[in-house]
Each structure stands twice: as C-alpha cells, then as structure tokens.
Image (cartoon, rainbow, N blue to C red):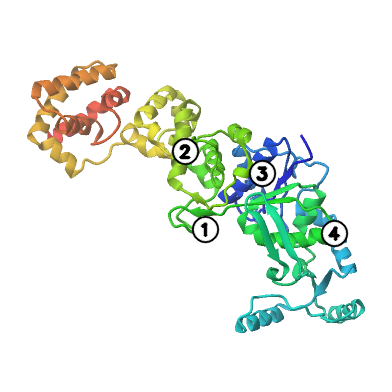
Amino acid sequence: MTDDFRVRYAPSPTGYLHIGNARTALFNWLFARHYNGTFVIRIEDTDSARNIADGEKSQLDNLKWLGLDWDESPENPGEYGPYRQSERNEQGIYQPFIDDLLKRGLAYKSYKTSEQLKAEREAQQAAKQAPHYIYEYEGMSQEEREAEYEKFEAEGLKPVVRIRVPEEKVYEWDDIVKGHISIGGKEVGGDWVIQKADGMPTYNFAVVVDDHLMKISHVLRGDDHVSNTPKQMMVYDAFGWDIPKFGHMALIINAATGKKLSKRDNDILQFVEQYRELGYQPEALDNFIGLLGWSPKGEDEIFSLEEFKNMFDEHRLSKANAKFDQKKLEWINNQWIRRDKDRIMPQLIEELVKAGLISEEEAKAKQDWLAEAIDVAGVDGISYTRQIVDLMREPFFQLGEVTDEMTDYLTSEAGQKVLAAWNDAYRALPEDADAETYMKTIRAIQNELEIKGRELWNPIRIATTHQIQGPNLPELLVLLDKNSVLKTMDEINAKYLA
C-alpha cells in the first residue's frame, strides 16, 4: 500500500445508498486498488437535522454487499481519525482553523438575520442581479469590526462565520475527467459560511480540513461538485496547503427522458437497497455502475470487479453524460444469473419461500426437485431473482382459472379428440415417465389424429396445467405429481369432455 494515492468516499447518513453515490464509491475504490493506494471511508454527518437512523449502517452494509472494502473508516480507524465529522468537531479539530482565519482577517463573524438575508435576495432579484452576499463591514478596520461583534453579542445574536472571497482571483485546475476548468471568484456568489451559528463547520470548509489532515491525494466525485471546488480551493489557499487532484464524473441521466437522474424520479429505482431486495446480483450492479461514465477498451460489457480493478484507467472516465438504462441493467443482471445458476439457486428458492409458495422445511426437503423445476420454468429468461415467483406460481404451486380462450380450445372438434386420446394415453404411462416418453406419446396422438400445432398442444397443456403458454411441456410433466395432474384432468374432463 502506498501513501501516494489516498482517496475517500464520504457519505452523509441522510439516506440509503443511491446509485450515484455507489458509483462515486466504486470509482474511488477502483482508483485506490488499481494503484495499490488507500481507500478511506469518512462519514460527513454534520447536518444532524437530516441524518436518519441507521443511515450510516445502510451505506456501509450495501457497500460491503457490492464487494467493496476499505482501509480506514469509523469501524477500522487508521492514524487520521476520527472518521466521523461530528466526532472530529467534538474533538475541536475545526475550531483552531476557523479561529486562525478570523485572527488573520480572512474570515469574519456575520450577525445578519434570516429576514435581512431574505430582503437582500429579494432586492437583488428585483434588480435582476445574480444572488450574492453583501459584506456588511466594508471600510471598517479590525477594531471596528470587533466593536460591532460586541454590540451584536449584547443583543443576543448568534453569528455565523464567513470567509472573505477574493473576487479578483480566478480558480483554475486540470480536472482528471473534464480537463482544464476556470471559475472566477466573482462567480462564487460572495462570502460564504464556513461555520454555522450552532458551531458546526459547513461542508465546504470541513471537507477541506479533513482531506488535508487525512492526506487525501485525489478527489473523484460527481459533476454537481464542480461549483464547490473554487470555494474549497479558497480554503486550501488560505492555509497554504497543497490542493488534491480533482476529478468530476459525468452526470447520470435517465436514458428514457434525457433528464438528470433525480431522487424524485419515480420511474427508476435508484437505491442499491431496492435492487438488492428484488434479487439483483452485486456483481451485476458493480458491472452496470462501472459502465456509467467509464468505457473499457473493446466491445465486451460483462466484467467482474477484479477485471474492472485491473483495467481501470481514470483517463477513460467520460465527459459525456452517463445514461441510466434500466433495460441494460436487467440484461447485465440476466447475464450474471445465467453465468452462475448453481450459486444463485439458493436465492431463487428463498424467493419462493418468501412468497409463501413453499415452507422452509419443504424447500429443504425438495431442493433437487425445486432446482429442476426452476430450470424448466425458465430461469435463463429472468432479469432478477424475484421474477422466479411468477414463473413458478403456476402450475407448480397453483392453478389459474380456465379462460374463455382455453374453453374454445377444449370444446372445439379437434380439442375434444385430443382430450380423449390424451386422457387414455397419460393414464397408461408409468409414474416415472421421462420427457422423451411424454414427447413420443404426444407425437403418437398427433400422428393418429392428424392434428398438430396449437390444436394439439394447447388442449393437453390446458388439461394438465390450466395454461396456454408455459415451459417445455414434456419436461414440465416429468416434474408434476401424477396424482395431482390426474385430479386436474378429471375436473377438466367432467366439465368439458362430451
């Protein structure tokens, strides 16, 4: 492991693991592992009002499920801890740096009320001006500012601390993903808050202090952080610290609408937890997420995490928006299901148990039969494991209603002949007849009656399963209990066979 490459994923425990955040974590992990560097997990929990119970646990559990590991975190701290911002704040890590900026006149206390700030914004809007903060101590000396502080304190007001923005300065960096970026100080929107009235540091301040003290060398994050970068560079400059290399990954957009993927977009499932519950495979999620804004060489699209790690090249991160294509995710997951059905089989059986189609005790006793039935039901065609429930429900566990279309097949002249012939033939077959025997029997009926196609197959399928479409019928009949099939056929014959 080398200290030359130290990267971090720094989630807020304000919700579950979003696909976009999972991509940030994955690419930082790939970057660290490819270069034999260090991957750090740091929890940015300063916004206590938005934190949710188990938010941190959910983030970490789902990262582990995706197969990601880390070298330093709250649960396995290294020498740069603590690894939660709230704990770092409690230990007073940020305050000396804020005090230093205040002392040097690079930051100041602001006592403006929310009503004053609102009035300023409305005035700027009316004047068609870009929103910006108006410095209230213009022309004052340090002593005069201190006197103002005392006056406001006497009135019982609590200050925020704002950093002075050098508006004349241009902030430039060579972005790992986007290339050269230049943003002027005037575009930042004026002096911004580095410490809230409750004493908590703001994100853009704390993240710089943490990244510096934790010796983070590279920062890979989403495109929406570009506007934060000049603010953070101001803090680095204020302390004379080395600035890490930034890389801002392309936006993820909804392939169907072309719009930025939003957590309010209900057309797409966006949280790893949701895909996990449906029975998507972690390898498939990694595979899909790894192709969101990154392109490998060649035409292949199915890669393991290990393969991604070995071929990772940060210069292949795309500037173009990454399209979230649900159909492609389903296809990739199907490929992983087909690739390793034996490993996934227990998950498929568990889906049947969870759906109440079979008890756990029965599932253990019938493991081999269930594996065969799942294969015959068409596991190769499912996109995620929960879909096996609908494939297996009928006819393995339940029988559907006989529809008008089915009745037409059963009561037609051809259907009546097939039903009668099948009734005699099926009863004569041994209980352990194999698929080849069933096929020969049906072919014999075809040759005898000179009836083929749907007029032959559908009456037999309906009589035994109450279905028109389904798995390969001879293979299906092998798996169905003969006594149960006979009971179904007797009910059909009694009602429809003349």
Q: Closer to the observer: label 3 or label 4?
A: 4
The amino acid type, in three-letter code, at marker 2 is Ile
Circle 4/circle 2 CB separation < 8 Å? no
Residue 289 locus on image (x, y percent): 55, 44
Circle 4/circle 1 CB separation < 8 Å? no
Q: Which mark is residue 239?
A: 4
Residue 167 locus on image (x, y percent): 75, 71
The residue tagged 2 is 332
Q: Secondary structure at mark 4?
A: helix
Q: Residue at x 72, y 45 (%)?
A: 7
Q: Which label's residue is closer to the chain start, 3 or 4?
A: 3
The amino acid type, in three-letter code, at marker 3 is Asn
How packed is label 3: few (under 14 Cα within 10 Å), some, or many (20 or more)?
many
Q: Closer to the observer: label 4 or label 1?
A: 4
Q: Mark 2 to mark 1: distance in Å?
A: 22 Å
Circle 3/circle 2 CB separation < 8 Å? no
Q: Which label's residue is closer to the chain start, 3 or 1?
A: 3
Q: Is residue 26 above or below residue 14?
A: above
